C-alpha cells in the first residue's frame, strides 16, 4: 500500500471519496501520464503556481491537453499580470516539488482557480502531492476538499480546440 500524502489525509479527514493512482517513470509529461494510466487526458489536470504582485501567489489547475493562459489567469484573480513561479521557489512556498504539486495542503494559503473545462467533467485527476501519485475524485466533491473558483484560464495547445 502506498504511503499516505498530506492531500490524501486531508481528503480522508473531510470524508471525500477518492482513488489513488501510481505510475513509475518520474517526471513524465501530463499527456504521458494519462496515456500510461489509460486516462482521458481532458480529465487529467496539472497544478501550476504563479506570482502576481509581490508575495501574491496563485494556484491554477489546467488540463494537460492545454497550457495556462497567463492573461486569462491574471484577469481571473484580479491581477494586472501573473508569471510562473520559478522552480526553485516551489518547495519553500508550497511544500511540494516540481511534478508533485497538489492544490491541497499547500504550505501557505493560496487562491486556487480550476479551469472551467472541469465543470463539464464527472471526475478529475491531479497530483497527490508526490511525484508518481495522482488523486482521482468527483468534480462534484471538489467544494468539500478545497476553496476554489472555476474560470476559463486554459490556452489550447496548437492544433487543438
Image (cartoon, rainbow, N blue to C red):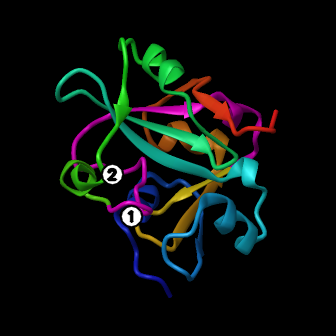
Q: In the structure shown, which secondary structural element does the residue marked by tag 2 occupy?
A: loop
At 42% across and 54% down in the image, what residue appears?
Answer: 102
Residue 49 included in the magenta stretch of the image: no
Question: Does residue 90 appear to the left or right of 54 in the view shown?
Answer: right
Question: Could you say which disc has been placed on residue 38 in the image?
Answer: none
The nearer-to-camera label among 2 and 1 is: 2
At 39% across and 64% down in the image, what residue appears?
Answer: 9
Question: Could you say which disc has been placed on residue 105 in the image?
Answer: 2
Q: Residues within 10 Å of mark 1 (few under 14, many from 20)?
A: few
**13 vs 129, nearest the viewer:** 129
At 70% across and 46% down in the image, what residue appears?
Answer: 65
Q: Is residue 53 above or below residue 123?
A: above
Give the residues drawn in magenta, as a range. 97-123
Question: Does residue 23 appear to the left or right of 51 in the view shown?
Answer: right
Q: Which residue is mark 1?
A: 9
Q: Give percent across and percent down for residue 111.
A: 36, 30
Q: Residues within 10 Å of mark 2 (few under 14, many from 20)?
A: many
Amino acid at each position: 500500500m502506498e504511503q499516505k500524502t498530506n492531500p490524501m489525509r486531508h481528503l480522508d479527514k473531510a470524508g471525500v471519496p477518492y482513488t489513488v493512482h501510481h505510475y513509475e517513470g518520474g517526471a513524465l509529461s501530463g499527456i504521458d501520464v494519462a496515456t500510461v494510466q489509460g486516462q482521458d487526458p481532458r480529465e487529467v489536470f496539472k497544478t501550476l503556481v504563479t506570482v502576481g504582485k509581490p508575495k501574491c501567489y496563485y494556484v491554477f489547475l489546467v488540463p494537460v491537453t492545454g497550457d495556462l493562459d497567463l492573461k486569462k489567469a491574471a484577469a481571473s484573480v484580479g491581477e494586472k499580470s501573473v508569471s510562473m513561479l520559478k522552480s526553485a521557489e516551489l518547495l519553500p512556498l508550497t511544500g511540494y516539488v516540481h511534478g508533485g504539486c497538489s492544490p491541497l495542503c499547500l504550505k501557505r494559503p493560496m487562491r486556487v482557480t480550476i479551469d472551467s473545462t472541469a465543470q463539464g467533467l464527472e471526475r478529475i485527476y491531479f497530483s497527490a502531492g508526490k511525484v508518481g501519485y495522482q488523486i482521482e475524485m468527483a468534480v462534484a466533491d471538489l467544494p468539500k476538499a478545497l476553496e476554489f473558483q472555476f474560470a476559463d484560464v486554459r490556452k489550447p495547445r496548437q492544433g487543438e480546440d
